[in-house]
Image (cartoon, rainbow, N blue to C red):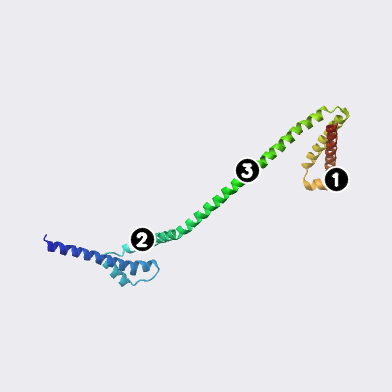
């Protein structure tokens, strides 16, 4: 093939490629994109532009779907581009808040540890005193006080048992038929506990 023919062939192919590209762009703009937008396109114009672009009527639905998909992807890309500055600002705010949280933790931790140490110290004092209380009660030489405590404990067990039995009765029936009795039992339990605490305190003081 001589050089003139080769050049003519290249020019022809280049011109054909340009023609097809222009025809495709024209078809996409005047048919596909309008259909995607919901517009009505004249049948004669559709047929003419399909033929120029080397497409068929069977290709048209696929081209419309493809255009919709591409439009959606471009929108996602645009949304992502628009979101990047907001993302950067949000990350800066997040890091700022994290730093503030860490500073708060750093500031409050020593205070918490100090308060915990004070609480532990007082707790140790209370626990140590509790064992002393038990020893004071057990070593009290007054047999009358211990006998009275034992009697109160027996009475308490009896009243607590009666209270538990009353609890099995429905609230409506209990209030209607046993209201006074329930109140008496509870008042009795309270009085016995107060008396017991008083005697224990007396044991501890001797």
Among the two numbered marks 2 and 1 on one chain, the one whose residue lies closer to the N terminus: 2
**Which is more toward the observer, 68 or 119?**
119
Q: How far apart are marks 3 and 1 (CA)?
A: 56 Å
Q: In which quarter of the image is residue 122?
A: top right
Given residues 87 and 184, the one toward you in this image is 87
3D distance between C-alphas at marks 3 and 2: 63 Å
Mark 3 in CB contact with mark 2 (< 8 angstroms)? no
Residue at 84 percent across and 44 percent down: it is 183
Measured as percent of width and height from the top left, residue 172 is found at: 79, 48
The reply to whether discs 3 and 1 touch (Cβ–Cβ < 8 Å) is no
Q: Is 29 on the left or on the right of 140, as rendered? A: left
Residue at mark 1: 180
Of the two numbered discs 3 and 2 in the rendering, the one whose residue sits closer to the viewer? 3
Classify residue 152 as left or right of residue 16.
right
> Disc 3 marks which residue?
110
Residue drawn where x is 60% and y is 49% of the image: 104
Q: In this view of the protein, which residue sits in the foreground, 40 or 140?
A: 140
Q: Around disc 2, counting alpha carbons within 10 Å, would you say few (fewer than 14), some (14 to 19), or many (20 or more)? A: some
- Judging by the rendered image, the residue that carries numbered circle 2 is 66
Name the quarter where the N terminus is drawn: bottom left
- Quick one: SS at disc 1? helix
SS for dot 3 = helix
Is the residue 14 above or below the residue 150 in the image? below
The numbered dot on residue 141 is none
N-terminal of the two: label 3 or label 2? 2
From this view, report whether residue 161 is shown above or below residue 92: above
Residue 164 place in picture, x, y as percent = 78, 39
Q: Position of residue 65 (x, y in %)?
A: 37, 61
Q: Which callout, 2 or 1, points to the residue nearer the camera? A: 2
Classify 10 Å Cα crowding around label 1: few (below 14), some (14-19), many (20 and above): few
């Amino acid at each position: 093939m001589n050089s003139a023919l080769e050049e003519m062939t290249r020019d022809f192919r280049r011109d054909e490629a340009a023609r097809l590209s222009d025809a495709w762009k024209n078809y996409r703009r005047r048919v596909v994109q309008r259909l995607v937008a919901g517009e009505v396109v004249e049948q004669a114009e559709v047929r003419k532009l399909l033929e120029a672009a080397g497409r068929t009527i069977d290709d048209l639905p696929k081209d419309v779907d493809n255009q919709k998909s591409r439009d959606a992807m471009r929108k996602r890309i645009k949304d992502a581009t628009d979101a990047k500055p907001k993302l950067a600002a949000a990350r800066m705010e997040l890091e700022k808040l994290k730093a503030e949280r860490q500073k708060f933790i750093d500031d409050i931790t020593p205070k918490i540890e100090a308060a915990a140490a004070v609480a532990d110290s007082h707790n140790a004092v209370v626990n140590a005193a509790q064992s002393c209380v038990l020893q004071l009660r057990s070593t009290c030489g007054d047999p009358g006080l211990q006998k009275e405590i034992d009697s109160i404990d027996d009475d308490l067990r009896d009243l607590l048992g009666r209270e538990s039995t009353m609890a099995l009765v429905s609230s409506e029936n209990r209030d209607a038929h046993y209201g006074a009795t329930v109140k008496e039992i509870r008042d009795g339990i309270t009085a016995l506990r107060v008396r017991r605490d008083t005697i224990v305190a007396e044991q501890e003081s001797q």
